[in-house]
Image (tube, rainbow, N blue to C red):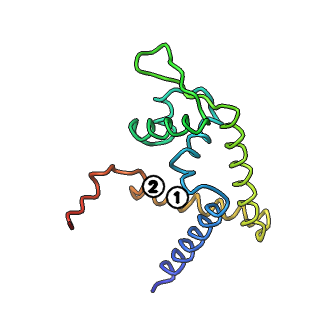
Amino acid sequence: MTEATKTLAQLKKASKLTRLAFHKNGPKSYKRGQGALLNALLANDGTTQRELVKTMGMDRGDLKGIVKKAERNGYVTIEDCDAKHTYAVKLTDEGRKVAEKRVAANDKTAEDILDCLSADEVAQLNALTEKLILSCKDKGINGKKKGRKAHSCHCC
């Protein structure tokens, strides 16, 4: 195993443990489900379905299901817009409270994880990870999903 492979294995392990720490403090669907929707609306409440599709990076069908579920849970309301076939999604008071609680929990988790590093070390870590991200993007690795057709398993 090369040094590069060992280093990236350590980075992968740190990433996994970090993800587990965030999961321990909240819902596992926070990145792709109702939590992500609430987070997006916390930043831009009353946004349209089309804007949410762009912001959240998912297709309209998936977003519609998440919005409907969040509406059933009392987190959002759906309102018609002037444009045809477009609706605005707005946080309810309960939805805002849940979103703010999640942001606070995530902030605390992040602080707990990084409290072993000095401010200079955190800045160095940010610079190094950004450099790795840019290197991957330069090589055509961008992390965007290709859709369900990208993985065609015919094992059954």
Give the quarter of the image for residue 75: top right
Secondary element at tag 2: helix
Secondary element at tag 1: helix
Residue type (three-letter) at the residue carrying disc 1: Ile
Report the residue marked by disc 2.
137
Q: Is residue 21 left or right of residue 7?
A: right
Q: Is residue 30 left or right of residue 111?
A: left
Give the quarter of the image for residue 127: bottom right
Residue type (three-letter) at the residue carrying disc 2: Lys
Residue ID at (56%, 40%): 37
Q: Is residue 121 left or right of residue 155?
A: right
Label 1 Cα neighbours within 10 Å, binned few <14 / some 14-19 / many ≥20:
some
Q: Nearer the viewer, residue 34 or 144?
A: 34
Q: Is residue 152 left or right of residue 137?
A: left
- Outermost residue, front side: 72
Q: Up-down: is 4 above or below 129?
A: below
Residue 115 position within the rendered picture, expressed as x and y whole percent measured from the top left: 78, 67
Residue 116 position within the rendered picture, expressed as x and y whole percent measured from the top left: 77, 71
- Outermost residue, top side: 82
Report the residue marked by disc 1.
133
Residue 148 position within the rendered picture, expressed as x and y whole percent measured from the top left: 31, 51
Residue ID at (79%, 67%): 118
Disc ID at residue 5: none
Asked whether disc 2 touches disc 1, contact meaning CB atoms under 8 Å apart, the reply is yes
Quadrant of the snapshot with the N terminus: bottom left
Residue ID at (51%, 40%): 69
Q: Up-down: is 147 above or below 74?
A: below
Q: Nearer the viewer, residue 54 or 153?
A: 153
Residue ID at (40%, 35%): 60
Label 2 Cα neighbours within 10 Å, binned few <14 / some 14-19 / many ≥20:
few
Residue 22 position within the rendered picture, expressed as x and y whole percent measured from the top left: 64, 61
